[in-house]
Image (tube, helix red, strand yellow):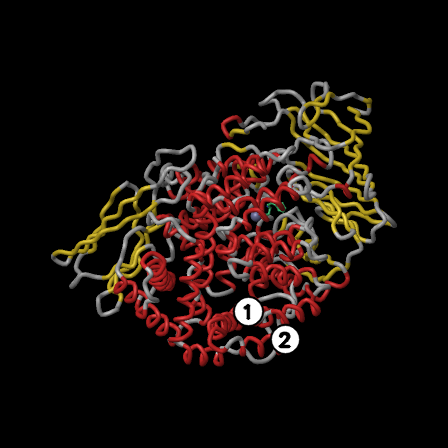
Amino acid sequence: PQTIHLADYTPPAYWVEDVHLTFRLAPTATRVLSRIRFVPNSDAPGRFFLHGEGLTLISAKINGAPVSPAFVEDGLTCAVPDGPFTWEAEVEINPQANTALEGLYRSGGMYCTQCEAEGFRKITYYPDRPDVMAPFTVRVEGSDPVLLSNGNPVAQGDGWAEWHDPWRKPAYLFALVAGDLVAHRDSFTTRSGKDVDLAIWVRKGDLHKCAFGMDALKRSMDWDERVYGREYDLDVFNIVAVDDFNAGAMENKGLNVFNASAVLASPDTATDANFERIESIIAHEYFHNWTGNRITCRDWFQLCLKEGLTVFRDQQFSADERSAPVKRIDDVLALRARQFREDNGPLAHPVRPESFVEINNFYTATVYEKGAELIGMLKRLVGDENYARALDLYFDRHDGEACTIEDWIAVFEETTGRDLSQFKTWYSQAGTPRLDMTDSFADGTYTLTFRQHTPATPGQPDKAPMVIPIAVGLLSPNGSECVPTTLLEMTKAEQSFTFEGLEEKPVPSILRGFSAPVIVTRKSDNAERAFLLAHDTDPFNRWEAGRALAKDALVRMVKEGAAPDAAFIDALGQVLADDTLDPAFRALVLHLPGQDDLAQTLFDAGVTPDPIAIYAACDSMADAIATTLESQLASLFDAMQVPGTYSPDAEAAGKRALANAALSLLSRRDNGARAQVQFDGADNMTQQLAGLGALIKQGKGDEALQAFYEQWHDDRLVLDKWFGLQCSLAKPDEAANVAMTLTAHPDFEWKNPNRFRSVLGALASNAAGFHHPSGAGYTVMADWLIKLDPVNPQTTARMITVFETWRRYDADRQALIAAELDRIANTPDLSRDTAEMVSRIRG
Ligand code: HT7
Ligand code: ZN
């Protein structure tokens, strides 16, 4: 397979002025007629080439005269006139046979499309690259009552509809949906007075699950006007829910297509976490209208330009709509769990990669989440006002263009007069910087000395120092803050900063708010951690101190066979008792670090992690917390019950999170009695699922699981939870078997990505079960990846990342995993997606 390099970018030889498409829909033989006006690019003359994959060409014409193009790899070429010309083609495609869910496919009896990144070439011949932008007019002919495409509706009749999208867009933003759908409708008036018709299109039975998504959409539209000055720009905004989807959602212009799990929610079927995720994905896709659609990427290497910025914007939105500190902690937890994990292993790559084989493999936590951290750092470095000015300049200057990271950085340099060339290293250098710190105090002057070091990553042995914004505050030993948050800018490998006029040596609170995506390697002692947990004014660092205490205690249990640390449990009890603290924050403190996180921590400390020992340590720590804090947890559980009608708002959700964290621990003491009561009486999914989970963990879940199945087997999204919970909570020696048994269940529709992930993804999330020394978890996983690959390469290639941490483990586990990776690699006709991933992971 061919490797594509950023350095080889060349502009297109032809621009597209205008696109007309007609779809004659039929499940196995859809005809796509295209009429495209091409104009030669006088700055970059070259061969006329159109991408095309899996298309049957029926006819082709140039300026009305039939032509016979030559088929070349990935497309076709043809002799063309000098100057502008009109290309017309008719192709046939088979949506029914499209199980890869890229291009035009069928899901639950409807037609839908997914074109990012390179799916449009599976629909018709076209220059399928993001720097070719054009207005589209689309006619859809079909027997379904609802026929949708991008832009504004132009006209419709019996069996047809016409759409026009006046905004120039790349082909990856094209969308078409046709089906027997109904709409949950609303409207929004923009601040300049434009009325926009909003609709969420679903199957009839899902209409009651749309209200929250619609509300989130309207709040997003309002927020983008208030915070970024961005208005919506079409007469309609349509969202469609589909069952079969490779990712969360897609920002097609005016016609967002959503995985049903990312938009549909009702109190009885969706948890608080589901509601929060839906809110952020709706916002994310909506915000793409400006950051991604109006201003897009020149090439796929620039993916972080739209994704990093849009994730940053959706994080800001959620922080504004909910609790900002809790949101920050959640985001950092996700970053560490996914992106740090990626950066630490064979799949490490820069936020702007320099080469790829299959671009779908680069929709990663590094591009998305680390990309968002880079925006946050820029904002911190230039300040809020300059950030706003730079963004205004970006929107003014580049509206309607396909841009690069250089364009992005330039608006900040021009707005602030700063040289950001060193900052750009964050885009090109992979790996998570390690930040060490020492301090000293003499004559009222406190000195902090930082050292930075980034470990080697694949293909990048040597690393340059980065610009690291380090937010620091200082606390007096009496617990009061003597120096409020100050931003230090580290630019060298080693650098000192001084604070003068202090009466006594302060306690440092560094990297407040997680001001840079780095790993602090400084070892503070537990007394200092407990002090910060009790006194820090920065909520993030307060939580971080508690987490460090928990990790230290758990690592000692694993490494030295230590008993659960009574001082940690005592500190935890004090946080739980502090009613001034947000319940959601207390719930976060009460959650122990994840077992995968502990495995990496041990590995970094030079210890080969044993997932079974880690599981046992977490289990006995949970027992100790439950025993020591039983009465406090019981009172908290009672106090945090939320009476009345369910609402997914942050305050109520925070109370439920704390009550359910307490429930999980208390179930160890009452044998699941409270969990059973909660399960039996629950009137919402958050409570029902928490009760069920606690019962399963106590080995008392069989009846509840059966009842849950009977209640919910007709609801696909809830049934995914039923599958998932059984795998993620199975005991280590049972997990592989549970997963295997569930894959034989009649409801295991393995071609549906949500269902596949609900079993195989959940198995991998069960660290001790997946890494059981028998290797059975690895074998089940590999068997299913081999089976899925020819059907859906994208989902297979994503799921294979469950093996990315394999080098951390002992020789026996490594040998077992290597054998499974080799088995996958040697499978005949492996997709390009999976072949690239397996070879990078195997190394
Ligand atoms: N921009 C989209 C990324 C995407 C995608 C979405 C659905 C299916 C396949 C996909 N490949 C890439 C989603 C987003 O970031 O908003
Ligand atoms: Zn996105």
Q: Residue 519 at x, y = what percent?
A: 35, 50
Q: Is residue 494 above or below residue 711?
A: above
- Say if residue 827 shows up in the picture: yes
Element type at mark 1: loop
440 and 761: which is toward the camera = 761
The amino acid at mark 1 is Gly
The residue shown at (75%, 40%) is: 137
Instruction: Locate residue 327 relative to residue 573 in the image: left or right.
Output: right
Q: Residue 67 at x, y = what percent?
A: 79, 21
The residue shown at (47%, 35%) is: 843
The residue shown at (59%, 62%) is: 726
**Sequence order check: which comes first, mark 1 or mark 2?**
2
Element type at mark 2: loop
Q: Residue 718 at x, y = what percent?
A: 66, 63
| Number of numbered discs on residues | 2
Q: Residues within 10 Å of mark 2 (few under 14, many from 20)?
A: some
The amino acid at mark 2 is Asp
274 and 186: which is toward the camera = 274
| Residue identifier under label 1 | 699
Give the spatial CA distance, label 1 vs label 2: 23 Å
Instruction: Locate residue 676 relative to residue 240 in the image: left or right.
Output: left
549 and 814: which is toward the camera = 814
Do tag 1 and tag 2 residues touch (Cβ < 8 Å)?
A: no
Q: Residue furthest right?
A: 158
Q: Is residue 816 above or below residue 567?
A: above
Q: Is residue 79 above or below residue 576?
A: above
